[in-house]
Image (cartoon, rainbow, N blue to C red):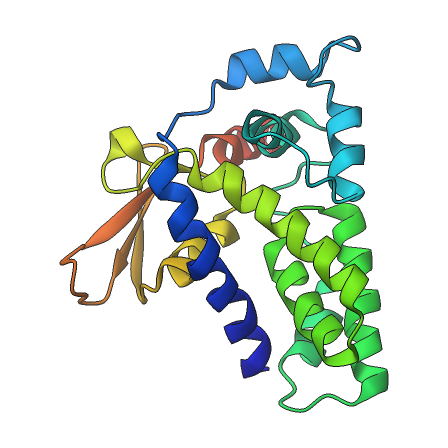
């Protein structure tokens, strides 16, 4: 499904690079986020934010997107190391070089099922974007694209990844690889340093050796599992 991969990567490179130039990176304040998203009268009340995300509300501010993305780590449904029963089926179809129309529709159905359980699953969104583009379902394509943009706006606003102090903050390890692809770097290796994942990359014109990702919510979730 090479076309699908290129579709989203080209979009990301075009939109995200301009975005990061205009926004000063800011670490998420998890303590404040947890407090605000729990208040029913808050503009950041989580059920309201999630509903706006599901409706692909393009009027959401960057701060609202940040509370949406990082606030998900405090929801019962957050499971960074879990996997939907539909993901294997989705992967199998997504690997096909030239899927038929019925297969494209199945990709959309499987992706929808995955996203019910894990709304920020970028792999599922990416696969569905390809299928929707092939099926020429423009309305839903634009909605999913807007949702993906919300997630990425929040993620890329957290840092540049070049140092621990300016690490990217992610809720899922899979989002680390999405970041590398978006920025055009080739993954070479991974190591865990304290609460950071450090991903090394192939030689590049910028002479960047790798990027840091803060995965605190993932590690905290794992600790809770083994209590």
Quadrant placement of the C terminus:
top right
Q: Residue at x 58, y 48 (%)?
A: 149
Q: Residue at x 62, y 90 (%)?
A: 97
Quadrant placement of the N terminus:
bottom right
Q: Nearer the viewer, residue 77 or 14?
A: 14
The image position of residue 33, as x and y in percent, is 58, 17
The image position of residue 84, as x and y in percent, is 74, 55
33 shown above or below 170: above
21 shown above or below 190: above
Q: Is residue 59 visible?
A: yes
Q: Residue at x 60, y 29 (%)?
A: 61
Relative placement, left or right, of 4 versus 56 is left
44 shown above or below 100: above
Q: Nearer the viewer, residue 150 or 224?
A: 150
Relative placement, left or right, of 209 versus 66 is left
Q: Is residue 178 visible?
A: no
């Amino acid at each position: 499904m090479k076309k699908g991969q290129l579709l989203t990567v080209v979009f990301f490179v075009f939109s995200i690079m301009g975005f990061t130039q205009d926004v000063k990176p800011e670490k998420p304040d998890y303590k404040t986020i947890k407090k605000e998203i729990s208040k029913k009268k808050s503009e950041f009340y989580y059920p309201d934010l999630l509903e706006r995300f599901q409706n692909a509300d393009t009027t959401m501010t960057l701060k609202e997107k940040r509370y949406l993305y990082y606030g998900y780590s405090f929801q019962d449904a957050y499971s960074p190391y879990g996997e939907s029963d539909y993901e294997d089926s989705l992967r199998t179809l997504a690997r096909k070089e030239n899927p038929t129309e019925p297969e494209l529709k199945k990709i959309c159905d499987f992706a929808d099922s995955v996203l019910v359980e894990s709304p920020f699953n970028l792999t599922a969104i990416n696969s569905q974007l390809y299928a929707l583009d092939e099926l020429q379902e423009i309305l839903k394509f634009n909605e999913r694209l807007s949702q993906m943009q919300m997630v990425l706006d929040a993620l890329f606003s957290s840092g540049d990844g070049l140092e621990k102090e300016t690490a990217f903050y992610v809720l899922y390890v899979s989002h680390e690889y999405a970041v590398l692809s978006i920025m055009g770097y080739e993954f070479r290796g991974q190591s865990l340093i304290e609460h950071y994942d450090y991903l090394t990359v192939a030689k590049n014109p910028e002479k960047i050796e790798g990027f840091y990702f803060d995965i605190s919510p993932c590690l905290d979730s794992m600790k809770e599992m083994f209590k």
